[in-house]
Amino acid sequence: MRIELSGTGRRFNQDWIFRRANLSFTTGEAYALTGPNGSGKSTLLQVIGGLMQPSEGKVAYHADGKPVAAEDVFRHIALAAPYLEVIEEFTVTEFLEFHRRFKPLRAGISVPEIIDRIGLGAAAHKQVRHYSSGMKQRVKLAQAFFSDTPVLLLDEPTSNLDNVGVQLYKDLIAEEAQGRLVIVCSNDPVEYEFCNTVLSVMDYKPAAQRR
C-alpha cells in the first residue's frame, strides 16, 4: 500500500491547520507524526486515512500498484484513536464480531483469542460501558491491530493505559505491525520509538504559525 499527499492542506473556516504537504507513505515502513498539543496532528492523520477530505491538494492511494477508489479506502485501513468510540452497549465479544463483518481478522486468530491476548478474558461478558478507560483503550487497539489491513493508523495509542497496558502496546507493535504501513500520531516517544521516520506537523504550517 502506498499513500501520497500532493500539495495537501486542510483548514477550518479561515484557519489553515496545515498546508502544502507533500508526503509519501509506504507499506513496511513506520512513521511518527509529532507536534505540540492542538497543532493538527490528528487532523493530518485523518486526512491521510481518508476520514477527512483535504481543503487543497489531493491524497492518492495505491495497492499492488493500482489506484484505490475513494469509497474502498476504508477496507485497507485500521485506526485506533480517541475520537473513535466503541459501541458501549456491546460486550467486547459482540463488538469484535460486529467489527469483523466489515474488516476480516488477521489470519490465524479468533475473537476469543484476541480477547485473551489483550487481557480482557475475565471481563468478556460485561458490556463495554462498564469498562474502565484503560480497558476501552485495549478494545480500540484490538480492533485496529487484529484487522487484516495493510495500513495501521494509531492516534495517541497508549492513552489511559497503565504500565501493563503500555507493554501490551509494545508487544502488539512487535507482533502485529510487521510488514504493514504504520503511522503513529503522538507526542510521547514511547509510542513511536520503533518508527524509522519522524515528521512534525509544524513543518506544514503557514510560516506565520510556526514557532
Image: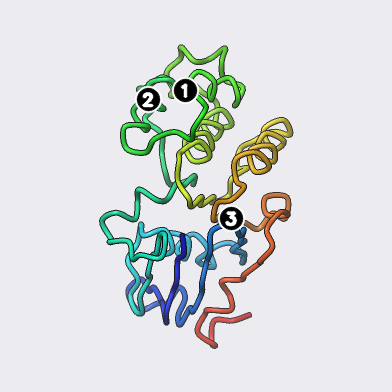
Element under disc 1: helix
| Camera-side mark, 3 or 1 | 1
Q: Amino acid at mark 1?
A: Val
Q: Residue at x 51, y 52 (%)?
A: 153
Element under disc 3: strand
Residue 111 shows which numbered tag?
Answer: 1
Element under disc 2: helix
Task: Find disc 2 in the rendering and name its residue.
Answer: 97
- Left or right: 152 as drawn, with respect to 96: right
Q: Amino acid at mark 2?
A: Glu
User: Which quarter of the picture shows residue 67?
Assistant: bottom left
Residue 92 shows which numbered tag?
Answer: none
Position of 194 relative to 67 (above/below): above
State the CA–CA distance, disc 3 to disc 1. 25 Å
Circles 1, 2 touching at the beta carbon (< 8 Å): yes
Q: Earlier in the sequence, mark 2 or mark 3?
A: 2
Task: Find disc 3 in the rendering and name its residue.
Answer: 184
- Between 206 and 123, the one nearer to me in the picture: 123
Screen quadrant of the C terminus: bottom right
- Left or right: 73 as drawn, with respect to 43: left
State the CA–CA distance, disc 1 to disc 2. 7 Å
